[in-house]
Image (cartoon, grey):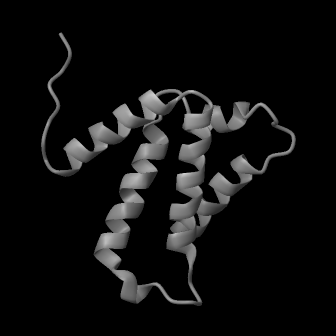
Amino acid sequence: PMFGIVRDTMMLALSDTDDPDRERLLSAFGGDCVRISRIRACLEAAETVLGADTITANDQRLPQCLEACKTVETVLMDLGLGWQLQQSCDSRRCRGRGQRRAAPL
């Protein structure tokens, strides 16, 4: 159910007709882009752990959630947050491999 909830949350933010300027989407996923990069990292880890054989035609929540995540990332890049998104994703990748980034001076 977690994948469905996250997917639905992202899709609601993307399709909110009362938010043409994407302020709610930015509030939820923008800024430093940590939330969306964490979501991406969790989804990719789940995909790796669960494997493609557990994803069936009857349960497409994980692939749909990944697609929604990619769409949110695209919107954030279109809104000028590409650098923040890249930095956050790079930081997640380093932590995921057990590495630590050096703290800025």
Q: Is residue 57 above or below residue 44?
A: below
Quarter of the picture holding the C terminus: top left
Q: Position of residue 41 (x, y in %)?
A: 36, 54
Q: Position of residue 18 (x, y in %)?
A: 87, 40
Q: Hey, which residue is sitting farthest top in the picture?
A: 105
Horizontal arrangement in the rendering, residue 18 relative to residue 95 (left or right):
right
The image quadrant that residue 54 belongs to is bottom left
The image quadrant that residue 77 belongs to is top right
For residue 34, say whether it is visible: yes
Horizontal arrangement in the rendering, residue 17 relative to residue 42 (left or right):
right
Name the residue: 34% across, 78% down.
50
Nearer-the-camera pick, 1 or 40: 40
Q: Position of residue 92 (x, y in %)?
A: 30, 43
Q: Is residue 30 above or below residue 94?
A: above
Name the residue: 69% across, 56% down.
11
The image quadrant that residue 74 belongs to is top right
Quarter of the picture holding the N terminus: bottom right
Name the residue: 20% across, 42% down.
94
For residue 1, say whether it is visible: no
Q: Hey, which residue is sitting farthest front in the picture?
A: 78
Horizontal arrangement in the rendering, residue 3 relative to residue 91 (left or right):
right
Count the numbered circles shown.
Answer: 0
Q: Position of residue 89 (x, y in %)?
A: 35, 41
Name the residue: 48% across, 32% down.
82
